[in-house]
Image (cartoon, helix red, strand yellow):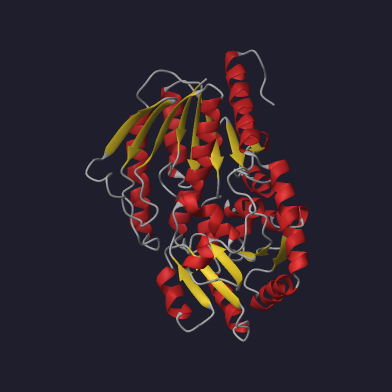
């Protein structure tokens, strides 16, 4: 089949969504499909275009399996400036659309959101190239932005909601990561369109390893009980709750909280962390080092602000499970993340913003290494049986073939 994939990030960019889409593309290519990728120039690491990619609006390259066109993301480092962010999304999506509509017919277009504007881009490309349109929703917008309090303007919320409904209405199929997200999206469009296909993790690459590794040595963590948050330090994460927990456990010199990553609120977090001797801030590490980073923790944290676990499933959860480490998720009760932790028997879920409950769960895992080890092993077993790259690629391949058959009139959609 001939496919077009429209995604905000792709290798060598280090955004989690980009890593997922990159692996999906390679898995589909290995199955013999020809793929065009429309994406941004790499910029996620420092929120500016990386050296070697500057100076051009579009850069294209041929690959053994197809072609990649990289577009200037018009990125801004200030996530709170909604006008600049919105303008960047529109600009990036408009240029990607202008490139994508040119070319011969293809079988399907897969567009990844956020940003929502890529849904509109995917639809335009699909129409121009006589293709089925599949809309992949990683996070449900504008719901996430409203929950965060980032979107407050009634007019902006209405506009974003209209764009969301526009994309859903024109998609032939919508893929989401969980049953809870399926319920969310299905309430806004024809629920028969919505299909659950989880993100995956490379369980051959990310796997259990020794705690005392080179990462611990480099950052002076040998012999410590490491409680780690690894990921984006942004508006969605309740890092304040993590720091409250660190303050509560400050009396124990063996416990160290490590915040590994960068993002919009890193400077605010750093100002407070300077007052806490048991907190270490480590900058974002190369993607190639992810197994080592994950393996260095005794306990991982997934802290989301209230309401967000209902509209997003962080890809880092799957990676933590694959690394065979227990986690404490500070998320909404009965959310998909909480249910995932429960099904996998991989740790504990506590209420978002409840520092006392978070502290108790951390303390329990630190004080009982045998229980922590059992939970880590259970996490590993669960993710290997449920979210391998080959299984997810096969699900997308089946979906594309189903849509192609339906458009040919040889099958009915179901």
**Residue 147 x/y as whole percent:** 55, 62
Q: Residue at x 58, y 82 (%)?
A: 247
**Residue 223 x/y as whole percent:** 60, 73
Choose between 314 and 88: the one closer to the eye.
314
Q: In the figure, 68 relative to 233: above or below?
A: above
**Residue 347 x/y as whole percent:** 72, 62
Answer left or right for 19 relative to 400: left
Choose between 66 and 220: the one closer to the eye.
220
Q: In the figure, 47 relative to 328: above or below?
A: above
**Residue 406 x/y as whole percent:** 62, 19
Q: In the figure, 364 relative to 7: above or below?
A: below
Q: Quadrant of the C terminus?
A: top right
Q: Can residue 370 be seen from the camera position used here?
A: yes
Q: Quadrant of residue 101?
A: top left
Choose between 276 and 253: the one closer to the eye.
253
Q: Can residue 170 be seen from the camera position used here?
A: no
Q: Residue at x 67, y 19 (%)?
A: 412
Q: Residue at x 46, y 80 (%)?
A: 272
* Residue found at the far bottom of this picture: 251
Q: Quadrant of residue 66?
A: top left
Q: In the figure, 268 relative to 193: above or below?
A: below
Q: Quadrant of residue 80?
A: bottom left
Count of numbered tags: 0
* Residue found at the far left of this picture: 55
Q: Residue at x 35, y 60 (%)?
A: 77
């Amino acid at each position: 089949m001939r496919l077009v994939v429209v995604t905000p990030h792709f290798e060598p960019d280090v955004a989690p969504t980009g890593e997922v889409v990159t692996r999906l593309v390679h898995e589909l290519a290995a199955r013999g499909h020809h793929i065009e990728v429309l994406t941004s120039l790499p910029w996620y690491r420092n929120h500016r275009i990386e050296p070697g990619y500057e100076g051009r609006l579009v850069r294209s390259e041929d690959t053994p399996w197809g072609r990649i066109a990289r577009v200037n993301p018009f990125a801004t480092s200030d996530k709170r400036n909604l006008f600049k962010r919105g303008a960047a999304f529109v600009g990036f999506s408009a240029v990607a659309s202008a490139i994508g509509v040119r070319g011969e017919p293809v079988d399907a277009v897969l567009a990844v959101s956020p940003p929502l504007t890529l849904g509109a881009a995917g639809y335009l490309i699909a129409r121009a190239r006589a293709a089925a349109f599949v809309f992949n929703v990683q996070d449900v917008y504008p719901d996430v932005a409203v929950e965060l309090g980032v979107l407050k303007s009634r007019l902006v919320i209405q506009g974003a909601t209209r764009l969301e409904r526009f994309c859903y209405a024109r998609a032939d199929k919508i893929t989401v990561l969980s049953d809870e997200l399926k319920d969310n999206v299905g309430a806004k469009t024809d629920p028969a369109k919505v299909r659950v296909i989880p993100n995956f993790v490379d369980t051959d690459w990310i796997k259990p390893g020794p705690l005392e590794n080179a990462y611990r040595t480099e950052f002076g963590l040998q012999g410590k009980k490491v409680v780690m948050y690894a990921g984006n330090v942004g508006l969605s994460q309740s890092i304040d709750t993590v720091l409250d927990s660190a303050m509560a456990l400050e009396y124990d010199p063996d416990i160290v909280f490590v915040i590994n990553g960068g993002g919009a609120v890193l400077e605010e977090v750093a100002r407070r962390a300077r007052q806490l001797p048991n907190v270490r801030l480590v900058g974002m590490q190369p993607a190639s080092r992810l197994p080592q980073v994950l393996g260095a923790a005794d306990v991982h944290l997934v802290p989301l602000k209230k309401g967000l676990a209902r509209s997003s499933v962080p890809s880092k959860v799957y990676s933590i499970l694959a690394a065979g480490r227990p986690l404490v998720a500070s998320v909404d009760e009965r959310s998909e993340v909480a249910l995932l932790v429960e099904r996998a028997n991989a740790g504990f879920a506590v209420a978002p913003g409840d520092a006392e409950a978070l502290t108790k769960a951390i303390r329990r895992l630190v004080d009982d290494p045998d229980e922590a080890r059992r939970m880590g092993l259970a996490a590993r077993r669960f993710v290997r049986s449920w979210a391998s790259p080959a299984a997810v690629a096969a699900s997308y391949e089946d979906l594309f073939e189903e849509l192609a058959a339906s458009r040919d009139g040889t099958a009915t959609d179901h």
